[in-house]
Structures are given as structure tokens and as C-alpha cells.
Amino acid sequence: MFLDFMSEVEALLKSALERCGCNLEDGANPLGLDISPHADLASSVAFRLAPCLKKSPAAIAVEIHQALPEDRCYVDRVEVLGPYLNFFVNQKFLDKVLKEALADDAWTGRMNEKVIVEHTSANPDGPLHVGHIRNSVIGDSLVRILRRAGCSVDAQYYINDMGRQEAMVVVGCDHFQIDGSKADHAVARVYIAANKLMETEPAIRDEADSVIARYEAGDKEIAAKIQSAVKYALGGIEQTLRRMNIRHDSYHWESEFVRKGDVEEIVGLLEKTGLTEWEEGAFQLDLTSHGFEKKMVLKRANGTSLYITRDLAYHRWKSENSDRSVDILGADHKLVSGQLRTALRLLGVREPEVVIFEFVSLPTGSMSTRKGKFISADELLDEVEKQAYEEVRLRRPEESEAFLREVAAQVAAGAVRYDVVKVSADKATTFDWKQALDFEKLSAPFIQYSHARAASILRRGEAELKAEDVSALRSDLLAGEYEIALLKKIAQFDLVIDRAARELKPHQLATYARELAESFNLFYRYSPVLDAEPDLRQARMALARAAKNALWVTLDTLGIAALETM
């Protein structure tokens, strides 16, 4: 839709620049194209040409305007506003938007890349806490965006089964009984108890060290214990993720890269760089020449590998099995992420694209799994679902208990997901359930309610548009301000998906979802559908269905349920 219009504008501008004898350097968006409040698409290319042409941007814009070809498909007119060239869509484009938005395959992207997205990857030593939620939601949203853009995506969970945390879980299970609570919470209790016991019995640390060494050496008894504990904890973690509509496609264990010899091979290749040395009882990679003060430890004194060594092997595997690989990491991983990417460059391995996110917090304060002071994702979801239930019950008191519970669960999950993803990853955020559940303001329930409202219009209008009806639509009747604005907003979906997929910024889609819902509600308020005369009624019903389709696909791509009634 909008990408077709943008492609035409790009072609027109390039043709005009050739006629003017202007050359642009390669780079991101060299034509300076973007959506503008003054036009459907604006170009700031004149600014970029001013230094080399020694003319004012406004004068350059006039010259380019005069050189634009007259043969156009979707461009209605082009206006010069100071240094800007403003492009506007025509009726043919709006007709295309409406008819495509009514089709089943309207939302298929054009990318064709194999992408691996690794997200969540929390240690299997306890439940997910609020700090993990942002990782999971950003990661899953990007998986969905990339798929919508046309990519083949493998959502991966990288399991830390060789670290001290998992060794302490095994030690904890040897000393304490697993209770019957949710699996990940039960594992957390023995992990916390083992750490507490270590404070008075230092031998516990020796037990953990022995578990680490024996597991890396391939001890079958220890392997069985660790794998059993990991799978048990992951079962609980997966339950929590499913509550937020998040699923992984594959799981990769750290140990698989040790067992296959990949880790030892990576260490050997790094040794050939001449930047490694044994120092203070550890084998280290000196990256000071690359701007890192802290050296990167590759092996302990006893010869066992570290997380980052195994991570290097994993990333090499990912680069060999994808066109793009994406990591979702918290801000506390900036240093180690930088070291990892530098080491990969030394190995000649393609680096991952890394999305670093700042943390989401609650007014209740800090969280620490080790000390047993954390707010689990389950607790947060339970609280939000409880509040959502009260909101839904107040609005729909006549409905059954099953309906209220089901809608509350969907509203709560959507509220958490949207409130997390709506903020750019590089900004810290605080989750406020009152704002997240506000049906009247810019929240997930507001967007879900807009979809339900569109569904209600269609039910009352009994509008099942057939193929012959679509071809006969008088879309030119949709000439009102809010009708045209809604069509244009629907058209922008493919542009938003394309940019969010390329730039790995899911908050852009969250912003679009809010704007689409606002645009639909303005249309609903000022453009009566069911009471309009027959031809206009049919056209507006078609627009309501197109808007419902757009809201559905937007919510679905954000991992939020598009409810038919609420």
C-alpha cells in the first residue's frame, strides 16, 4: 500500500535529480522521505544538496519540482513548501487501499530473509520477574513484526545449563525437597535455600564447583540431574510466557556447543590472534586495543569455559544459519555484548544485531532472584488480571463468569504487552497497571475496544461483502476528512512494519496501533455508518471492515488479542 506510493515518489525524485544533474551520496534515506503533517510524504533532499550546489535549499526544491515527470500513478500533486517537496496521494491510491484492506492477503510483507531472534533466555533457576518481561515482549514483538514483513523467523531460547546458577540448583535439590508449587517457583526456593546455606557452610561452594567441572567433562549422573532440573524450571517459565501469548520455536543448550567441540575451536582461533594470555589463573583475551579496559576471560584456571566463551560458539552457529541474527539484551549486558561482538569481528564472524533495553520497574523497588526478593511475572499478571476483571465486570455485568474471566485474561495480557512495548527500548519505563488498563485513554484496552466496536458495527449492519460488491464499491463517496484520514492511516501499515523490521524498533508499531485506533474512533464519531443512504452506507461499511482488518492485524502483530466483544 504505502510502500507502493513511496516507491513511486522515490522514482520521480531520482528522475528529477538526473534531469537536474544532481548526484546523491549513498546512505540511509538519501532522499529524505518521511511522513509529514503537511503532506502524505515529504522530501528534504534539497537540504542535502545545498552544500555541493552552493544554492539555498528553497531554490533547489523549486528546480527539482520543475523537473519532476508528469507521468504518475498514485501521486495526485506535488507542492513546494520552502525547502520541502510535499507529495499527496490521489483517489486511485485510496481506492487501492480500501480494496486491498478488504482482501485476505493484504498484509503480506516483501522481505525474504532467514532471521534468528534470541530473547528471554532467563536462567532456569526460578520464575521470570518483571525485569524479564520487557525482554520477552520486545523479543516476541520483533519476531511477529519480522514475520509480518515476510521473513522466516526462528524465535530461540538459549539455555544456560553450565553456569554456577544451575549448579546451585542441583546442589539445592540434593539438600532440599522440591515442593508442589509451580515448577519455576519451586526451583527458585531450593536455589535460594542453597545460596543461604552456603553462607554458613562454605563446602556448598565446593559442591557447586564440582558439579560445573563434572558436567563440562560429560559426567552422565550430573548431566541427568541438570537436564531434569532445567526442563522442570522451563516448564514453569513457559506457562508464564504463554499467559503473555509468547512462544519459542527452538531451544539451544550451552552444553551442546561444548560437547561438539565448538567452544574449544573458538578458543583456539582466538589464541591465533596473539591477543590471549594466561593471567591471574585464567585464560584471557586482551581487547584493550579495541577500547575495553577489562579483559575477556575465556577459561578458568581448571580449564572450564565461561558463559561468554560458549556464547561465542552459539553466535557463530547463528551467523552460519541465518541472514540476520538478533539479540535482545538488558542494559547490564552492554559491556559483555560489546566484547562479544569485538571477538566475533576478530574471528571474521558476522555480528548479531543487538537491541539493548533499559529496565522496566514497579513502584515496589528492586528485584533479586538470589536473595529471594523479586516480584515475579506471575504475580504481576495475577494482579493486572484481577484489576482487568473488575473493569470488565463493571462494563458487562450481564455476561457469564466464563466470559468475564476470558476477556479479563486477554485484556490483562494485552495491557502488559502494550505498556511495555510502547516505550522505545532505550528508555527506562515504569509499569502502572491503572494507566495500562484505562479503556478511555491510549492503552491496549482502548485499541482492543476499537476493534470490538468495528466488529459491532459490522454485526449490526450484516455486512458480508462479496467479491462483486468490492469491485462495485463507490469508494469516491468516502470524501470526508475522517474517512480519508482513516484510509491513509490504514495504508501506512506496511511502511510501519517495514521500518520496524529493518530498524528493530517495535515501539513504532505500538504508536501506529494507537494512531489507527484514534483515527477509527474519529471516523466512527463523525461519519454515521448504519444511518447513511445506501451507496454511502455500503462504502462506509466497507471502510469499517477495512479498519477492523487493519486493527486485527496490528494487534495480532503486537501479540495482543483482537476481541470481537468486550
Image: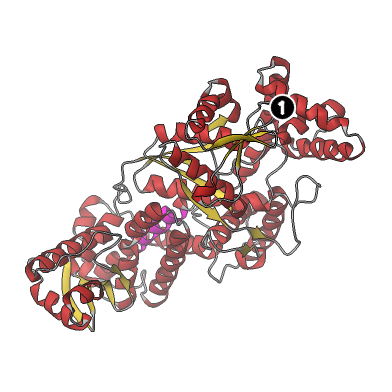
Residue 559 visible, this angle? no
Number of other residues with Cα within 10 Å of mark 1, as a class: few under 14, some 14 to 19, many 20 or more: many
Q: Residue at x 75, y 50 (%)?
A: 368
Q: What residue is shown at x 67% (from left), y 55% (from top)?
A: 385
Query: In the image, is 226 to the left or to the right of 134?
Result: right
Q: Residue at x 91, y 34 (%)?
A: 201
Q: Which residues are magenta?
A: 544-555
How far across and down, in percent of the image, does residue 514 sit? 46, 66
Magenta-colored segment: predominant secondary structure = helix
Residue 71 position (above or below residue 384): below
Q: Along the line of sight, which residue is nearer the eye, 326 or 399?
A: 326
Q: Classify residue 505 as left or right of residue 129.
A: left
Examine the structure image and report whether residue 346 is included in the region drawn in magenta. Answer: no
Q: Position of residue 375 (x, y in %)?
A: 74, 52
| 296 displayed left or right of 13 | right
In screen coordinates, is 535 left or right of 249? left
**Nearer to the camera, 169 or 565:** 169
Is disc 1 placed on a helix, strand or loop?
helix
Quarter of the image where one finds residue 12: bottom left
Read off the residue under disc 1: 212
User: Is residue 549 within the magenta segment?
Assistant: yes
The residue at the far right in this view is 200
